Image: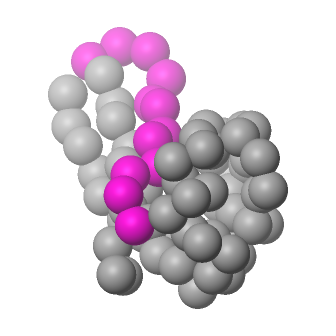
Amino acid sequence: MSDIYTTVTWDELNCPPEPCRVVCKGMTIQIKQSHIDAANDDPSATFALIRFQPLSGPASYNLGTRIDD
């Protein structure tokens, strides 16, 4: 298993107004209400994006915490 960390801006996620799944940079990412609250309508809000690759099966992508505050 390995974790790979990168970042994504709220604008790159198209500033979703409600929880949903979005496709960004070829990845499907789950947006939770806590992410929407943390973004606070700021398109430049930057979040950690973590790619998790298990030993077998497809990778999954998780939006982490806002990292520019």
- In the image, residue 8 sits, relative to residue 4, either above or below, namely below
Residue at 77% x, 47% y is 18
Residue at 20% x, 28% y is 1
Quadrant where the C terminus sits is bottom left
Question: Left or right of 8: which side holds 13?
Answer: right
Residue 17 shows in this picture: yes
- In the image, residue 1 sits, relative to residue 6, either above or below, namely above
On the image, the x and y values in percent for residue 7 come to: 43, 69
**Can residue 58 be found in the magenta stretch?**
yes
Residue at 77% x, 57% y is 16
On the image, the x and y values in percent for residue 21 come to: 72, 38
On the image, the x and y values in percent for residue 54 come to: 31, 22
The chosen color scheme is one colour
- In the image, residue 64 sits, relative to residue 48, either above or below, namely above
Range of residues picked out in magenta? 55-66
Question: For residue 29, what is the image quadrant?
Answer: top right
Question: Left or right of 60: which side holds 4?
Answer: left
Residue closer to the observer: 67 or 28: 67
Residue at 29% x, 51% y is 4
Question: Left or right of 19: which side holds 42?
Answer: left
On the image, the x and y values in percent for residue 50 come to: 37, 49
Question: Left or right of 13: which side holds 1?
Answer: left
Question: For residue 53, what is the image quadrant?
Answer: top left
